[in-house]
Every structure is written in C-alpha cells, then in structure tokens.
Image (cartoon, rainbow, N blue to C red):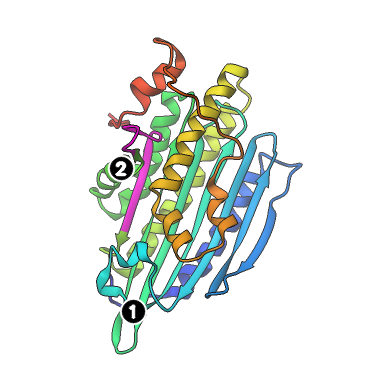
C-alpha cells in the first residue's frame, strides 16, 4: 500500500476526462442516440455522474459511470481485506464502463479504473489503484481475442515486462465463476492494491490501461456489428448474459463495495444487461459455434503465442 503523497484531485480530474472520452468514442456508433446523464449526490458523502445509452442500434445498453465516494469509516467489504485501516476516513473514486451490444456477434466489454485513499490524522495516507478490462464474447473470433490481449500487453509494456502476465493471470482467476466452474469470458487485465511503481508511475499505468480499453474495443465493435444473426444467436446471447448477472451480484468486488457503502443503487447496477435469460440444464450441441465458446474460448490460455 502506498504511503507517499498522492495527488487525489489530479486522479479525479483524469477520471472525469476519461469518462467524457469513452462516451464520445461509443457515441460514434449511435449518432441518433444520446447518453442520459444523471448527476447524483450520496447522502453519506460524495457523488457521481452516471451516463447510460439505451436501446441503440449497436448498444442495447452502454453505461459509463464516474463516482467519488467519501466516508468516515470503511465498509465491510474493504475493512475485511484491510482490517488495519478500520476507523480511517476514505475516498474511493473511479470510472466503470459496461457495454452490452445488441448484436450477439459483438462482445460485451467491461472496464474499470479506480483509486482508493484512506487517511487518519497524524498518520501517512494509504492509497492504491485498481482496475483492468475484460471481454465477454458470445460468438468469439480469434482475431478479436488476439487483438484484445495484444492491447492489454502493450498497455503494460512500458511499466514492466512482468505486469501483463501477472495481471492477465489475475483476470482469468478473478472472472471465474466457481459455482459454474467456468470463466466469464476471455479475460484481459485485472489488478488491485496497486502501488508498487510509486504514485506517479502507478497513475501513469492506470491512464495507459484506461486508454487501451477503448482503443481495443471500438475496432471489434466496428468489425462485428453488421454480422447477420437470428433467434438462435439472440437466445444464446441472453442465456450467456445470465452468467454476467451471476458474477456481478455474487463475486464482483466493486458491486459489493458499492452496495455495502450505501452507494447509489441505480449506478451500481448499471452494469447489468437490460435482458438476460436462464435455461435449465442447457448443453450446447457438439461441434456448434456455441460449443466452441465453452470448449475453447472460456478456457484461460496464452492468446499471444
């Protein structure tokens, strides 16, 4: 955990800029739709800006959320991990992005960059960064998987050769559903409690990750959004979205932190797909494109070899 001085306001200012930039890049695919902007205040401290684009031709729902939550004591999900920080005031800020496309051939994408600082009079501050991005395809294409992981590797490269393999493996582990014994998607990057480069370089790394996400995702959207599909593909997309819901409500740290810290429920649950389905005992037909997702793409692997 970092204990040197941290420029919290510079981080928050960049988070605001990133939110604007990502909204602009997604809006290119929806010229006739606008983001609904919902600025909110949290009674216990802090607030945020939730932006949601709904019912578009490309995105059934895309949300880009900024939050800056403050409090006098850590919520249970944080203090359980950091009991030595109990009793400190905190600021937790970040940008989270989820894009649920309409076309099943376009993957769902998620990204998050966040900063946390806990303070107590007479003691040095304790801070860290977290975040990453991951891709959840329904009908995956190897070209897209390789491009996604190449972007992840390149975002990490200036900061150390070990970061991509470490955070790629962490992502594979994090986005695993133990009760299903399967991964949510093809992964990407995940990191938390990150301070090892010092404040300036750790912040620069987070900026690199945030920019890499949108630079990697929009070309995939452009390549796949006109692909033909029918009811079979739509049904499978809705079924697989159910896994997204299960993960976010049961395991996701950000969702749990937000709910336990009495954050704004609408903004926290912005990540949910607008429609999802559950089917009892579904098994994909052997040799089908749906089976390929399970047999190949949901298994952690070296996409760059």
Q: Residue at x 54, y 44 (%)?
A: 272
Task: Give the answer, above or below, for where 168 lies relative to 288.
Answer: below
Task: Give the answer, above or below, for where 153 lies relative to 107.
Answer: below
Q: Residue at x 29, y 77 (%)?
A: 4
Crowd rating for badge 2 (residues with CA inside 10 Å; few <14, some 14–19, many 20+): many
Q: Give coordinates of residue 120: x percent, y percent.
A: 34, 83
Residue beneath disc 2: 168
Q: Residue at x 49, y 23 (%)?
A: 139
- Residue 229 shows in the view: no
Q: Secondary structure at mark 1?
A: loop
Residue 87: which disc?
1
Q: Give coordinates of residue 18: x percent, y percent.
A: 54, 58
Q: Locate residue 6 relative to residue 13 in the image: left or right.
A: left
Crowd rating for badge 1 (residues with CA inside 10 Å; few <14, some 14–19, many 20+): some
Q: Nearer the viewer, residue 300 or 144?
A: 300
Q: Give coordinates of residue 224: x percent, y percent.
A: 57, 27
Q: In the orientation shown, which residue stands out farthest toward the left?
A: 162
């Amino acid at each position: 955990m970092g204990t040197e001085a941290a420029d919290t306001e510079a981080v928050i200012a960049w988070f605001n800029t990133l939110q604007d930039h990502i909204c602009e890049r997604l809006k290119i695919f929806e010229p006739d739709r606008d983001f609904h902007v919902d600025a909110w205040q949290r009674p216990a401290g802090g607030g945020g800006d939730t932006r949601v684009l709904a019912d578009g031709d490309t995105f059934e729902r895309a949300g880009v959320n900024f939050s800056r939550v403050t409090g006098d004591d850590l919520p249970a999900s944080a203090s359980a991990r950091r009991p030595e920080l109990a009793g400190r005031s905190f600021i937790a800020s970040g940008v989270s992005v989820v894009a649920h496309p309409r076309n099943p051939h376009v993957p769902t994408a998620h990204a998050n960059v966040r900063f946390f600082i806990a303070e107590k009079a007479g003691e040095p501050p304790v801070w860290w960064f977290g975040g990453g991005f991951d891709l959840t395809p329904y009908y995956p294409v190897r070209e897209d998987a390789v491009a996604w992981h190449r972007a992840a590797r390149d975002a990490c490269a200036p900061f150390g050769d070990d970061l991509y393999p470490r955070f790629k493996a962490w992502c594979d582990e994090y986005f695993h559903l133990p009760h299903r014994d399967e991964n949510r998607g093809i992964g990407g990057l995940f990191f938390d409690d990150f301070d090892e480069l010092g404040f300036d370089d750790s912040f620069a790394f987070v900026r690199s990750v945030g920019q890499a996400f949108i630079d990697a995702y929009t070309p995939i959207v452009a390549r796949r959004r006109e692909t033909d599909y029918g009811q079979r593909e739509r049904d499978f997309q809705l079924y697989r979205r159910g896994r997204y819901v299960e993960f976010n409500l049961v395991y996701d740290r950000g969702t749990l932190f937000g709910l336990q810290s009495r954050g704004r429920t609408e903004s926290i649950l912005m990540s949910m797909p607008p429609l999802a389905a559950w089917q009892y005992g579904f098994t994909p037909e052997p040799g089908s494109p749906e089976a390929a997702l399970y047999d190949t793409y949901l298994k952690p692997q070296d996409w760059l070899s």
